[in-house]
Image (cartoon, grey):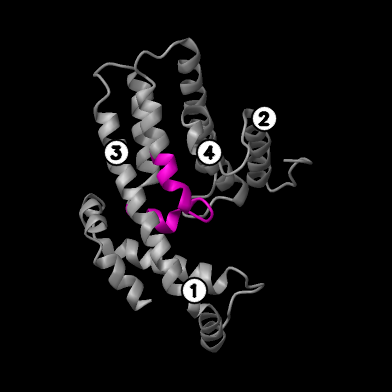
């Protein structure tokens, strides 16, 4: 992993754009952890339970480590560049124009990129972060001259984000939300692409109906019961 750390540390763009998020070392550590997960643990039926077993997994994935690290370095750089564009787009919205929607776009941005965001964003969604941030740019740009239908979509998206946050708040503090709750959160980001930046393409088909099913699965997971069929 040393060459990966060196490559990220030498990336002047990453270093510059990461300054507002604090020390780069945290993100580099998290990126290297993700490299190990993808190269050495992704196909494991069970996780290693001792040092010797872990060393075996590392040896098996060693050949892919540097290439995976370079690809994730690219994701990190693209994420930081897209964040800069999103910050600028939000700041450029005329004062007084749909302030609640602008505030929600800002909250969306802050929820996506923050100190520790690499570790906080699971696969496969980490590689999608630049697209979610580019969607924020499209979202706020569409506020100018927005008609009734565009505003309806904006408020619908805001409501889905609020619903997902409420579900997370129902989970015990300090614990990772159940997988269906996490999936709902990221499907909502994909839904945003389908609403405001269709040209970027979604990872999978997503619609209001799909989100309703996922919300039902999330509610079932929080309540500790089996989800309904097809959820």
- Give the distance between the C-alpha atoms of the residues marked 2 and 1, in whole angstroms: 39 Å
Q: Residue furthest right?
A: 229
For the residue carrying disc 3, how many other residues have a C-alpha within 10 Å: few (<14), some (14-19), or many (20+)? some
Residue closer to the observer: 167 or 183: 183
What range of the chain is rendered magenta? Answer: 115-133
Residue wearing tag 3: 85
Residue wearing tag 1: 64
Q: Earlier in the sequence, mark 4 or mark 3?
A: 3
- Give the distance between the C-alpha atoms of the residues marked 2 and 3, in whole angstroms: 31 Å
**Residue 137 falls left or right of residue 93:** right
Residue wearing tag 4: 201
- Using the image, determine if residue 157 lies above or below residue 83: above
Q: Residue at x 46, y 65 (%)?
A: 34
* Mark 4 or mark 3, whichever is nearer to me: 4
- Give the distance between the C-alpha atoms of the residues marked 4 and 3, in whole angstroms: 19 Å
Residue closer to the observer: 165 or 73: 73
* Mark 4 or mark 2, whichever is nearer to me: 4
Task: State the quadrant of the C terminus.
Answer: top right
Secondary element under disc 4, as helix, strand or loop, is loop
Secondary element under disc 1, as helix, strand or loop, is helix
Residue wearing tag 2: 209
Q: Residue at x 51, y 69 (%)?
A: 37
- Give the distance between the C-alpha atoms of the residues marked 4 and 1, in whole angstroms: 28 Å
């Amino acid at each position: 992993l040393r060459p990966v750390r060196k490559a990220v540390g030498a990336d002047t763009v990453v270093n510059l754009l990461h300054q507002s998020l604090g020390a780069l070392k945290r993100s580099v550590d998290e990126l290297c952890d993700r490299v190990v997960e993808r190269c050495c643990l992704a196909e494991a039926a069970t996780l290693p339970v001792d040092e010797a077993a872990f060393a075996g997994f590392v040896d098996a994935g060693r050949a892919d480590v540097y290439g995976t690290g370079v690809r994730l370095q690219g994701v990190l750089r693209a994420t930081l560049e897209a964040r800069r564009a999103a910050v600028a787009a939000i700041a450029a919205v005329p004062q007084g124009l749909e302030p609640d929607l602008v505030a929600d776009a800002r909250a969306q941005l802050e929820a996506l990129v923050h100190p520790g965001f690499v570790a906080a964003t699971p696969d496969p969604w980490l590689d999608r972060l630049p697209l979610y941030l580019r969607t924020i740019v499209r979202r706020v740009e569409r506020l100018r001259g927005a008609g009734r239908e565009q505003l309806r979509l904006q408020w619908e998206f805001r409501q889905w984000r609020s619903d997902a946050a409420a579900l997370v708040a129902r989970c015990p503090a300090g614990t990772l939300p159940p997988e269906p709750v996490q999936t709902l959160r990221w499907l909502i980001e994909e839904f945003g692409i389908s609403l405001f930046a269709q040209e970027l393409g979604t990872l999978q088909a997503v619609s209001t109906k799909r989100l309703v099913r996922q919300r039902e699965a999330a509610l079932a997971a929080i309540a500790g019961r089996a989800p309904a069929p097809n959820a």
